[in-house]
Structure formats: structure tokens, C-alpha cells
Image (cartoon, rainbow, N blue to C red):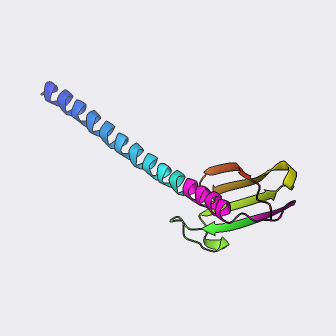
Amino acid sequence: MVESLIALLVLMIGFMAAVSMNTTALRSETTNELQFQAVFLADSKIEEVRSFMPTFSGSSTSITEFFDRNGLVTNDANAFFTRKTDITLSTPSSKTDEVRVEVTSSRSSLKINYVTLLDHVDG
């Protein structure tokens, strides 16, 4: 009888460990999904700016956009992600322009920062 109870206890401990590992894996998957979405939003903005880089110099601008959990544009009240883009257009002599993209999540501590220098385009 004692051996059966010990075997049942060992079996229960193994079962609890498996459930715990499964819960941790699901939590990790959700975190990875959010990170992927944030990186995608940042990278897509960098590529957008690279494709349509303004041709004037010596100026800067800041753009803030809001997205839901799936990366679709939404308003500030429903935003899951906020993407802030700062574009600094340098003088023609510096030959580079700076683009900073920061993606944050209002419902987690997620924060992605991209900074890139683009060749300056003279108008």
C-alpha cells in the first residue's frame, strides 16, 4: 500500500512539472509574438521612410501612430502598440539622415528601438 502511494506521489509530481512547463511555454510564445509584431512595425516604418525619403535638408519631423495587437491602425484609446518615428534630415554636407523608430506597448513592458542612418538625398 505504501509503495502504491509513493508511486502515485511521484506520478503526480511529474504531471505537475509537465503542466508547469506547458504554462511557461505558452507565456513565452505570447511574449515572442508581441516582440515579433513590434519589430515588424519598427522595420516596416524604416523601410517606408527609406522608400520615400524627403529630398529637402536641415529639418526634422516626428510621427506618432497607434496600432492594435494585430498591427492594424487604430486610435489612441484602443492602441496596443505606439510607434513613434523621429526623422532628422541633415545638411547636404553631412551626407546622412537619421531615422529613429520606437515601438512600445501600453499593456506590457515591451520597448523596441531602431536607429538607422540613411544616405542623404539631395533635391
Query: Of residues 28 and 87, which is closer to you in this image?
Result: 87
**In the displayed structure image, the side of residue 121 where residue 50 appears, left or right:** left
* Magenta range: 38-62
Position above or below: 55 against 14: below
Q: Who is closer to the viewer here, 72 or 87?
A: 87
Residue 116 placed where, x, y %?
70, 49
Q: Position of residue 78 (x, y in %)?
A: 60, 71
Any magenta on residue 81?
Answer: no
Answer with the quarter of the image where residue 20 lies. Answer: top left
**Where residue 9 sits: x, y (%)?**
24, 32
Residue at horizontal 74 percent and vertical 66 percent from the top:
63
Tell me the residue at 64%/50% (across/down). 111
Q: Is residue 47 magenta?
A: yes
Residue at the extreme left of the image, as rendered: 1
Q: Nearer the viewer, residue 22 or 2?
A: 22
Position above or below: 19 against 82: above
What residue is at 64 percent from the left and 74 percent from the top? Answer: 75
In front here: 115 or 102? 115
Q: Position of residue 62 (x, y in %)?
A: 78, 63
Residue 104 in view (yes/no): yes
Q: Residue at x 60, y 73 (%)?
A: 74
Q: Quadrant of the C terminus?
A: bottom right
Image quadrant holding the N terminus, namely top left
Q: Is residue 107 visible?
A: no
Q: Residue furthest bottom?
A: 75
